[in-house]
Image: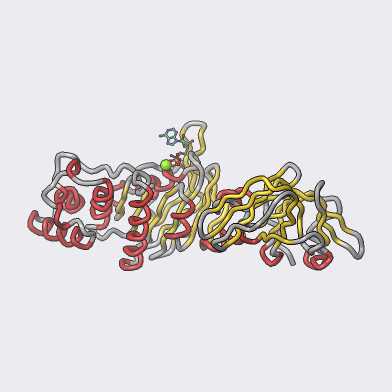
Amino acid sequence: MAGVSFRGVSKAFGSVVAVDDVSYDIHDGEFVCLLGPSGCGKTTTLRLIAGLEQPTGGTIHIGDADVTMVAPKGRDIGMVFQDYALYPHMTISENIAYPLKVRGISKEDRAKRAAEVAAHLQIGNLLERRPGQISGGQQQRTSVARAVVHKPQVFLFDEPLSNLDAKLRLEARGFLKHLQQELGVTAVYVTHDQAEAMALADRIAVMDGGRIVQMAPPLEVYHRPATTFVANFLGSPPMNLLPVTIERTATHTRFVAPTFSIDADEWSGRLKDRVEHGEEVFLGVRPEHLGVGREGDPWTMKGELYAVEPLGPETLVTLSVGDALATLRIFGDEPPEVEGTVHATIDRANLRLFRSSGERIELG
Ligand SMILES: Nc1ncnc2c1ncn2[C@@H]1O[C@H](COP(=O)(O)OP(=O)(O)OP(=O)(O)O)[C@@H](O)[C@H]1O
Ligand SMILES: [Mg+2]
């Protein structure tokens, strides 16, 4: 096992900059999820680690070795692609053993090792079948077995679960988490699915436009998003972002919106030297940190009921607040009784502030 380091790595395809001057370290044994919208450079990042693309700038290390100019077969990598890329004419056993064949391992040893890994992944009874004769979930496990069979230093996964239905996907996610903990693998895992990234990752790297916007443990990314982009990308529904204007005097602080105004004197010290009178900022608060309050309660904003969505263990209550919408997540079997004007109370321990340009304001 080994870590992966990027130093000022860029990759351009003509005028398209797919990866834009990124530097970071993925530690030995760490599971990192790359999360971000379509086209942000996730697959290109994996292909750079695998050596399937050459960077147009910067250096890549795997362990202590500079692999920037090393061909794919000289890098010790296991890769699982989105479409599994199994060979249809080969048996499951031959598919799994293929990386060993390429490395010149004897036929007997290959079959033995493939059977071991397959048993581990509960596909040991399918070894003589061909990919067309097994289910999507079994193909996915075959693809994982092939990636792990030669015990590579680094695993790369490119949306390996995206072809599975919701139930199988959850099962496979649990299995990958288990495998990761059992093998202690260094893995870079690309997904669109923020819940998958939260569930699997030691750290999440949120990408946008070829850059890493934030790289941190899942709960830190969730609770302390670096920017409004990250705040919006993680969480379902995402973090509420409400535009307000800061009103400050020597003794008072308020957050003022067209339809509500919050007395924030308590935060005067925390905001000192950080925001200016008249500055426009976003209040950022997750749905579970808004509750149903009463008129006159402190740290409350007023809205008009827009929708109530009972989901079983929780209910989503959405309010229209001026031009914005704000969603409350209310836990419990019974939907709350709300109608007309609703006062939503902010759990201020979990309130974040963002500049109009998007960065989170570090409070004192
Ligand atoms: N071989 C290529 N030639 C030209 N442009 C490319 C090539 N590969 C990728 N790109 C461009 O680079 C950018 C990043 O692509 P990449 O495949 O890394 O995105 P991604 O984050 O994996 O997206 P998705 O979530 O849709 O898979 C995109 O604008 C894409 O069009
Ligand atoms: Mg991709």
Q: Residue reaching furthest right?
A: 250
Task: Count the labels in the image.
Answer: 0
- Tell me residue 303's x, y (percent): 74, 50
Closer to the camera in the image, 278 or 125: 125
Tell me if 92 is positioned left or right of 234 in this view: left
- Tell me residue 180's x, y (percent): 35, 63
Say if 34 sits above or below 88 in the image: below
For the C terminus, which image quadrant?
Answer: bottom right
Q: Residue reaching furthest left?
A: 108
Task: Kindly indicate the quadrant of the structure image that contains residue 84.
Answer: top left
Closer to the camera in the image, 195 or 56: 195
Tell me if 322 is positioned left or right of 251 in this view: left
- Tell me residue 144's x, y (percent): 28, 53
For the N terminus, which image quadrant?
Answer: bottom left
Task: Kindly indicate the quadrant of the structure image that contains residue 119.
Answer: bottom left
Tell me if 200 is positioned left or right of 295 in this view: left
Residue at x 41%, y 44% (from the top left corner):
43
Residue at x 40%, y 48% (from the top left corner):
46
Find ligand 2 in the image and state its quadrant.
top left
- Tell me residue 11's x, y (percent): 47, 41
Whether residue 245 is visible: no
Residue at x 17%, y 52% (from the top left corner):
97
Say if 163 sits above or below 146 in the image: above
Q: How is the image coloured?
A: secondary structure
Whether residue 29 is visible: yes
